[in-house]
Image (cartoon, rainbow, N blue to C red):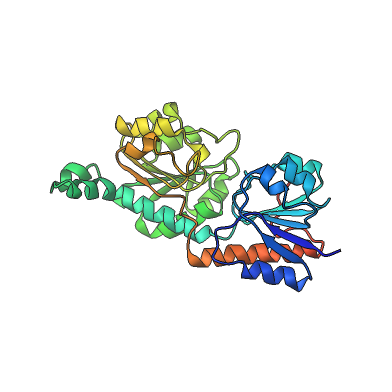
Amino acid sequence: MTLSVVISDYTFPNLAQEQAAAEAKGASLVAYQSKSDAELAKVVNGADVVAVQFATFGPLCCAAVKPGATVIRYGVGYDNIDLEAAKKAGLKVGYVPDYCIDEVAEHSCAAAMALLRKLVPLDASVRAGEWAAVKHAKPIKPFAETTFGFFGMGQIGQRILTRLKGFGFSFIVADPGLSEKQAEKMGAALVDEDTLLTNADIISLNAPATVKTTNFFNAARLARMRPHAMIINSARGQLIVENDLADALEKGLIGGAAIDVFQAEPLAMSSLLRKAPNLLLTPHVAWYSEAAINRLQGFVAQDITRALNGDLPRKPVRI
């Protein structure tokens, strides 16, 4: 029986790397633009490998693929794959958490610089016909007097910190998985979450969405932050209660924010964030570079080869 590889959906210019990997093992490859579990289940029947970008891979898909099949997620997260159903079906699940580490770190650094130097309100003031630098710039602290905080410190957080060391910031980090010694080795002080909120001038969110971190940045916690403090979120939209953030910005409870990820995407036209002041919005683009896309597809192609060889994914999801 011919081995079968299915691409559920994709936004890439081509699938040359994936096609080559399948053909090298004598497997067929077909690609679709599916969205729902029911829609995708119709085309993955008996598949040995399924690569999923944004489509929902739910119980129907888990039941339709070949027993023991491999599901690979194009990306860092895998929220669109029903892990419980996959486990019950005996499937192997892989993802690609390491294809855009530098890109996300660099985006976060760029956002931090824009926020700290007040580029968003200054740009808006000039476009509105004003020429009032101090009015819109203050308060601005020298970087050497600025405490840069991290909510979570994984690979991306570490790359951000490394890139920012030359600017003279003081660094603090709240991460339950980090020891004081590890933080010190990175050049940061380990603090608890409350100290992070009350002491940081800017906080980069670099934590996964878990039961504890989901909606962590709500009205009560935003109110604990310094009135000039800022937030960068290039991690997971679920970490912030968006209406609470919009309200905090409107009331001047915090100084600004740069948000690249949202609770639901694309961001609704009715979202209060669209009208909030001192807010830099980007369309979930921190991951992007042409090299990152090539890297992502290359890693998925490797996983296609591994799956057809009967091996586990390069980065398996523990289910």
Residue 296 position, x and y percent, is 59, 62
Viewed as shown, does residue 169 lie left or right of 59?
Answer: left
Residue 248 position, x and y percent, is 35, 31
Vertical order, 223 against 59 (above or below): above
Residue 88 position, x and y percent, is 80, 41
Which residue reaches farthest top? 220
Give the residue displayed 45% in from the left and 38% down from the top: 196
Q: Examine the image and state in which quarter residue 250 appears.
A: top left
Viewed as shown, does residue 32 lie left or right of 92?
Answer: left
The quadrant in which the N terminus is found is bottom right
Could you tell me if residue 186 is visible in this image? Answer: yes
Give the residue displayed 57% in from the left and 43% down from the top: 208
Q: How many marks?
A: 0
Residue 226 position, x and y percent, is 34, 34
The quadrant in which the C terminus is found is top right
Give the residue displayed 52% in from the left and 54% down from the top: 156
Could you tell me if residue 141 is visible in this image? Answer: no
